Image (tube, helix red, strand yellow):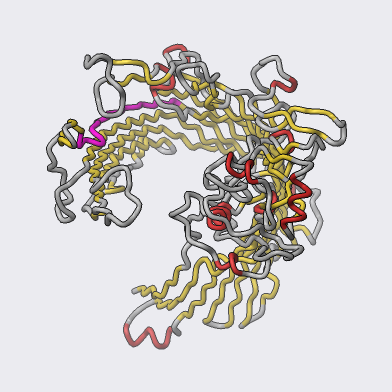
Amino acid sequence: MMIPVPQVKGWYPGLPSDLTITKGLHFKPSFSYLIDDYKELFMRKGTPVDEVQPSTQRQKNDYTKNARQLMIDQVLQYDFSIKDVHNFTALGGVNFIRNTDHVASLGSQRGSNDYIYTINEPPTTVINGVVMSNVTNFATTIGESRSASAFTQVNYDYKAKYLFSGSLRYDGFSNFAIENKYAFFPSASIGWNVHKEDFWNVKAINALKLRASWGAAGLSDLSITDTYGGYASVLDNRTANYGQSSGILRSNLANYNLRWESTETTDLAFDASFLNSRINLTVDYYNKRTKDRLASKPLPSESPFGSIAFNNGELRNRGVEIELGAAIIKGNDFKWDANFSFAYNQALITKLPDNGRAKNRQGGDMIFDPASNSLVEAGGFAEGERPYPIYAYRVTGVFATDEEAKAWNAKVKDNLASPQGITVGKRGGDYIFDDVNGDGVIDTKDQVFMGYRNPNKMGGMQNTFSYKNISLRFTVDYAMGHLISNGALARSLGQGRAFNEGAPSIAIGPDIWQKQGDEGKKYARFSFADYDFGQRNYLRNAPLGNNNSYNSDVSAMYSKGDFLAFREISISYDVPKKVLEKIKASGLNIFATVYNVGYLTKYEGLNPEVYTGFDPGGYPRPRQFLLGATLKF
């Protein structure tokens, strides 16, 4: 059980101000202090003796985190004009942020009863003559990071016709090594309001603006241990001691060469208004190049550490965004306004550190390519390829009978089944996996490309209908281009750990194999302990797939994640002014709203808004109902 504990979260008094020094010259200091206190008490009651026993009995956890953030901004701004046609804004300033946190995490086991949830157990217990520790966790951590920035910006326009803006930033972050703490990020933009020109005489287009920009921004998402390395005690409950002696050892490798991750963005766009602004269109093309990406590099298995933080090459995101808005009907009593958006993004890895492999590929595996009739490298990260591809083992059908499976067993061996499954062989109701290279063995070389984890097309639409005092708003959004493995269904049909998965209704449905002679079924038979002892019909991971215990890299478990989400339906009513005069109010709006109404999608799992490649079975967005009123005097 989780014990609710009072906490302070998100309280931050701010002291912003705007001081006028002289005409056009302003000093804008601001100060804020964020307090974020969190406390969690957890207790797991004793498990009945007739149930599967957890590794710890009557476990208790006491977790406390106290975080503070101090932020100071100092900005000096000067606005002035020359002959009322040349308009300038110049500003300069500094920003300072200090983050600190203190975490205390305590844990115990073998509590004496189910009623006391505070930790008061003795540190040790004697079991069968052996001294055992009751301490499951005992640690405190402190952390501090600081960032400081100096910036300047100049804005200029001539009669609001020609626009220019330029800025310079010099950012510093304490978690980098001394020689890499600071980085320089410039940006510039230009704009042209074409419709303000004397030559513009296009009545159908009442406004047209062309704009372009280029700029760089930095990311410093790393901990101080990524740069300087971390240390751990060798005499605690988490790390084995050495000869009962205390000491410290490295917990991760240092990398003093870590640099700021930077993204350079080039943007070309136009904004146009038609028919006296009844129709508004924005088209924006962008090209983002991210350099020195901060990432974690896996190390060889013989290394004492699993990974090290490093700067990992370049990633390009290129695409277009379109926004269209229109007052479709503009009557005296009835109005219909609509807004539509569409975004397409193409991600591509353009550069990786040289490692001697083709395309400098990182990770990946060898698979059989039918086109070239040879083994090729695939998956992982590689220059010239889209990131986060998904591979799986292709299912070509379900064995209808034991005889059909026996004939297959005589020709093909599935080395990816469990040891017991390999011994038993396939039976009626098992999946038929594609032996892509035809060598008579199902192994990792038989992985096939399925698609990508992330959508590349997204957008939304909002319609607002108004009739006199009543307004109805209807909002939808969508995403396309991503795949999802129904991991939750796979674990249910394969009974992941033999005792902790519930059987889904599909297990007795028309699409699953249930008896000898069942042909053309979509799903293999319902299994018990499919991974540990079975054929791994469902619980099978591919090195180039999602490769997660709550995932299934079996093609039958994959489907498109495309969806249209009915995000919001809202209706409101403005009470007539004649009625409000009686209570001396200036306005009263009564409204009712439903959020997350539902989805239009072919994905049969719990939540199509999953961009990790697999659905582990988490809760979808909750449907929310809101009823309220806004009264103004």
The verdict on residue 548 being magenta is no
Residue 147 figure quarter: top left
Q: Is residue 167 above or below residue 106?
A: above
The kind of secondary structure the magenta stretch mainly shows is: strand
Quadrant of the frame with the N terminus: bottom left
Farthest residue to the top: give it.
179
Q: Is residue 317 above or below residue 604?
A: above
What residue is rendered at 64% in x and 62% in y?
564
Residue 376 figure quarter: top right
What is the tally of numbered marks visible in this picture? 0
Q: Which is more toward the observer, 310 or 81?
A: 310
The verdict on residue 135 being magenta is yes
What residue is rendered at 12% in x and 37% in y?
122
Q: Is residue 273 above or below residue 23?
A: below
Answer yes or no: is residue 251 visible: yes
Q: Which is more toward the observer, 429 or 23?
A: 429
Q: Is residue 433 left or right of residue 485?
A: right
What residue is rendered at 39% in x and 74% in y?
628
Farthest residue to the right: give it.
372
Q: Is residue 460 left or right of residue 397?
A: left
Answer yes or no: is residue 212 visible: no
Residue 287 in the image: state x and y as whole percent. 69, 35
Residue 502 in the image: state x and y as whole percent. 48, 61
Quadrant of the frame with the C terminus: bottom left
Q: Which is more toward the observer, 73 or 360?
A: 360
Residue 363 in the image: state x and y as whole percent. 63, 27
Residue 391 in the image: state x and y as whole percent. 69, 40
Residue range of the region highlighted in magenta in the rendering? 133-150
